[in-house]
Image: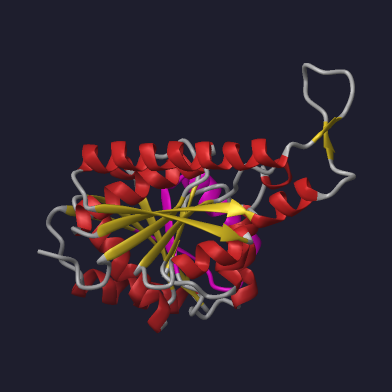
Amino acid sequence: MRNNLIRHIAVALDCSPHSLASLNAAAELARRMHADLTGIFVEDLNLLRMAALPCSHEIRIYTDEPEKIDLLQLERSLKRQAREAESALQHIAKEFMVEHSFRVCRGMVPAEVILAAHEADLLVLGRSGRSPSCRKGLGSTAKKALAEGKRPLLLMRTGFAAKEWPVLVLYDGSTGSQQALSTALSLAEPGTLHVLILGETPEEAMLMEQELSATITRPETVIEYHRLPLHDGKTLARYIRMADSGLLVLSDRMRLPIETVHTLINEIDYPVLLV
């Protein structure tokens, strides 16, 4: 039976390690949710424009002098990368037995990825891409998707397998956190779900834990509750790192300021599902 919320998953592909981790996660989720999977590859228009400039040169590791960038060679390289991305998609889709399609676009990479994924119910991105400037923190495409409110949004990184995810969800009683909890429960079954309750006071956090314990009955899911103060963003980041969760599920429609949520997502080097 198809999942009512996630029927179509889009994943951005550029053959970087984070991109390939995203593809594996997207395929695993598509299998679990009986969803279709679309791979998106963008030919970088900025790169092509730069290559067309008469002053553009490149320095290769095996040459002593800068060489003029060959625009035709760059075009062929992009086509080759697209074929490699499509081949990776076909391989993983066959392994996970999911329906799939592939789309090639040309333009500004962040804008084209988000536009191509407009009809998808979930967009999956690598936390960073090929650029050396985004080896720490989020890449430009992830930042744009986060800023423009594409939801749900899964930001992946290497070193995590979706089928082995322990799941941590942030809960403060708000509508956004209730949706995050519902999503986390569906991902953690069977398995262990860590619920981090954020309360204005210890008494409020205890009351929320009691209410959740009384209403959530999932025999195949082990639920562990933890409590932290609501507005201490630094303590929250430290706790998430110590918990070493595989996947963090949260919403930016919680009582936490949206700036705190986005800063947290940028700083922690874990997969994040924002709903």
Give coordinates of residue 26: x percent, y percent: 35, 51
Is residue 232 in sight in this rendering?
no
| Magenta stretch contains residue 29 | no
Q: Is residue 244 magenta?
A: yes
Could you tell me which quadrant the C terminus lies in? bottom left
Residue 6 placement: quadrant: bottom left
Could you say which is closer to the camera, residue 207 or residue 158? Answer: 158
Q: Residue furthest left?
A: 1
Instruction: Identify which residue is drawn at 65% across, 58% down.
Output: 140
Question: In the shown orientation, is residue 162 left or right of residue 69?
Answer: left
Task: Choose between 78 and 139: the one closer to the eye.
Answer: 78
Is residue 122 shown above or below 134?
Answer: below
- Splitting the image into 4 quarters, where does residue 264 fall? bottom right
Taking the image as shown, residue 60 lies to the left or right of residue 218, namely right
As rendered, which of 53 and 228 lies closer to the eye?
Answer: 53
Left or right, 85 with respect to 37, comes to right
Q: Residue furthest front?
A: 72
Q: Is residue 59 above or below residue 161?
A: above
Residue 60 location in percent, x, y? 78, 25
Residue 253 versus residue 209 in the image, above or below: below
Stretch of the chain drawn in magenta:
225-250
| Colouring of the image | secondary structure
Left or right of 191 on screen, residue 171? right
Give the percent coordinates (x, y) of residue 134.
68, 47
Instruction: Give how far across and how far down residue 66 sits, in percent.
Output: 87, 28
Total numbered circles:
0
What residue sits 41% from the left and 68% below the top?
Answer: 152
Residue at image coords 18%, 58%: 34
Visible residue check, residue 185: yes
Q: Quadrant of the N terminus?
A: bottom left
Image quadrant assignment for residue 210: bottom left
